[in-house]
């Protein structure tokens, strides 16, 4: 946008040749009307123009909620107006006369900024969507988990979700259900290890009246309850071998038979499976059928433990405190020292343990403010600075926990002795710098 027709022509030819789509305008009022449709990414605007100058154009454009990047062009003597435009939100300015390379460099920088801004907006939208599903995915590891969950959600394929106890396998399963075409139907979850073996078949597939002693009426199984929706078979590794055979048949044929009935019924439930066990090891040792393993492991989503994704801790604490506050009927907060204690803890019970610890701490806090010292077990896990976990309470702790603590403290002290110089710390520890970086990440010291 410039009132000089010669400059408009030369810039149009230059930018067309560089692959930009260019619209040239010499009247600021007409330009403002054309720019309101939101089709422009960048606006090159002269500061001094008749009728409406560049600064006034910028103000009116922003008032109309225009979001293109504004680059001001200022001739000699108009630099003050260009700087004023920067203060009011312009991206950059070019003093006239400028070389073509200067212009192109400025435009490429603006182009890269817009690309990054779009990427950030996309990530924020993804994170907001995942937060709607009760998933905190601030770490790269959890973003990868949710990216895979998002891609597999629209398809009816079986998904195996693995991870340690308390990592949030059911939460991810529910998120998959909420993102899939079956979202308006039921989500049914069953813990295969929590139901006696004698009742599990009836629970899954249902039974007919008189099928066994105590079967006084027909019973609908969980597969039928989840018809058209999603069925999560949690702790599938606990299924007895006989039921594994029957489950495989259901998955292959899409039909179930109630206990005591010979007629087959349609089973239209998307199956998600979850386990904290190593099913590959169970297959090798004959505790889990190999054919069933391959049938449920079409897509594998592994949720890393909380100690491997410390970037999620702050977001999880914020989300869990909202839940704790809602349950307790009062606002529960945490101090900076309390949050630091949370960050230092390895949380062997993962998110479930973290939530329980926050709730216990909230109950014990008279004013609803959680302090570092109010955390039950916090000293047991991390101890005082320089104090072993067993010394903090006088009680024995698991050997693995004590070893982890000792290694973390050794690495921390080496870093302190080396004044934060990681190469020197690695030398003191007699390990490679690469190994040190791994240890820092492992213990949340990076």
Image (cartoon, grey):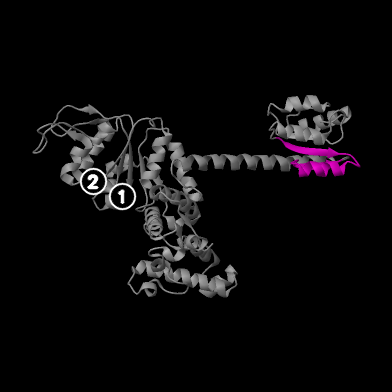
Packing grade of label 1 (10 A; few <14, some 14-19, many >=20) is some
Packing grade of label 2 (10 A; few <14, some 14-19, many >=20) is many
Residue 197 image position (x, y, % from top left): 18, 46
Q: Is 86 in the magenta?
A: yes
User: Which secondary structure lies at badge 1?
Assistant: helix
Q: CA distance from mark 1 to mark 2?
A: 12 Å
Q: Quadrant of residue 62?
A: top right
Magenta span covers which residues?
68-95
Q: Residue at x 38, y 30 (%)?
A: 184
Q: Residue at x 41, y 47 (%)?
A: 326
Q: Is residue 277 above or below residue 132?
A: below
Foreground: disc 1 or disc 2:
2
Q: Is 400 in the magenta?
A: no
The answer to whether residue 210 shows anywhere in this view is: yes
Q: Residue at x 52, y 73 (%)?
A: 413
User: Which secondary structure lies at badge 2?
Assistant: loop
Q: Quadrant of residue 203?
A: top left
Residue 279 image position (x, y, % from top left): 31, 49
Look at the image and tell me in which quarter the N terminus lies: top right
Q: Quadrant of residue 63?
A: top right
Look at the image and tell me in which quarter the C terminus lies: bottom right
The answer to whether residue 430 shows anywhere in this view is: no
Residue 328 image position (x, y, % from top left): 39, 50
Q: Is residue 293 left or right of residue 375?
A: left
Q: Is residue 201 left or right of residue 10?
A: left
**Mark 2, residue position:** 239
Q: Is residue 134 left or right of residue 48?
A: left
Residue 17 image position (x, y, % from top left): 77, 32
**Marks 1 and 2 close (CB-CB < 8 Å):** no
**Mark 1, residue position:** 279
């Amino acid at each position: 946008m410039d009132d000089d027709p010669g400059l408009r022509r030369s810039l149009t030819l230059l930018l067309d040749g560089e692959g930009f789509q260019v619209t040239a305008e010499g009247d600021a009022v007409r330009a403002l009307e054309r720019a309101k449709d939101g089709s422009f990414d960048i606006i090159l605007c002269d500061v001094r123009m008749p009728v409406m100058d560049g600064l006034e154009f910028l103000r009116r454009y922003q008032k109309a909620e225009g979001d293109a990047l504004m680059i001001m062009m200022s001739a000699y003597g108009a630099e003050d107006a260009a700087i004023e435009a920067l203060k009011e939100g312009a991206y950059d300015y070019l003093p006239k006369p400028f070389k073509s390379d200067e212009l192109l460099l400025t435009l490429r920088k603006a182009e890269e900024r817009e690309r990054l801004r779009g990427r950030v907006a996309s990530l924020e939208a993804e994170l907001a969507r995942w937060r709607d599903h009760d998933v905190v995915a601030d770490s790269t590891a959890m973003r990868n988990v949710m990216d895979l969950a998002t891609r597999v959600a629209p398809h009816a394929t079986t998904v195996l979700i693995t991870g340690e106890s308390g990592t949030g396998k059911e939460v991810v399963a529910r998120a998959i259900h909420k993102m899939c075409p079956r979202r308006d139907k039921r989500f049914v979850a069953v813990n295969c290890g929590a139901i006696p073996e004698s009742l599990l078949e009836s629970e899954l597939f249902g039974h007919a009246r008189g099928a066994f002693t105590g079967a006084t009426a027909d019973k609908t199984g969980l597969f039928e309850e989840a018809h058209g929706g999603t069925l999560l078979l949690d702790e599938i590794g606990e299924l007895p071998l006989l039921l594994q055979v029957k489950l495989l048949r259901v998955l292959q044929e899409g039909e179930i038979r109630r206990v005591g009935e010979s007629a087959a019924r349609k089973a239209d439930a998307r199956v998600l499976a979850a386990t904290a066990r190593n099913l590959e090891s169970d297959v090798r040792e004959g505790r889990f059928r190999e054919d069933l393993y391959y049938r449920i492991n079409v897509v594998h989503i592994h949720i890393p433990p909380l100690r491997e994704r410390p970037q999620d801790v702050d977001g999880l604490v914020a989300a869990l405190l909202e839940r704790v506050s809602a349950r307790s009927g009062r606002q529960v907060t945490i101090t900076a020292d309390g949050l630091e204690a949370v960050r230092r803890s390895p949380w062997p019970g993962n998110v479930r343990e973290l939530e329980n610890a926050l709730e216990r701490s909230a109950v014990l806090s008279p004013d609803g403010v959680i302090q570092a010292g109010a955390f039950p077990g916090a000293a047991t896990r991390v101890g005082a600075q320089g104090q072993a976990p067993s010394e903090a309470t006088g009680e024995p702790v698991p050997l693995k926990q004590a070893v982890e603590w000792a290694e973390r403290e050794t690495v921390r002290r080496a870093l302190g002795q080396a004044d934060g110089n990681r190469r020197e710390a690695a030398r003191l520890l007699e390990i490679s710098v690469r190994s040190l970086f791994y240890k820092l990440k492992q213990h949340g010291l990076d």
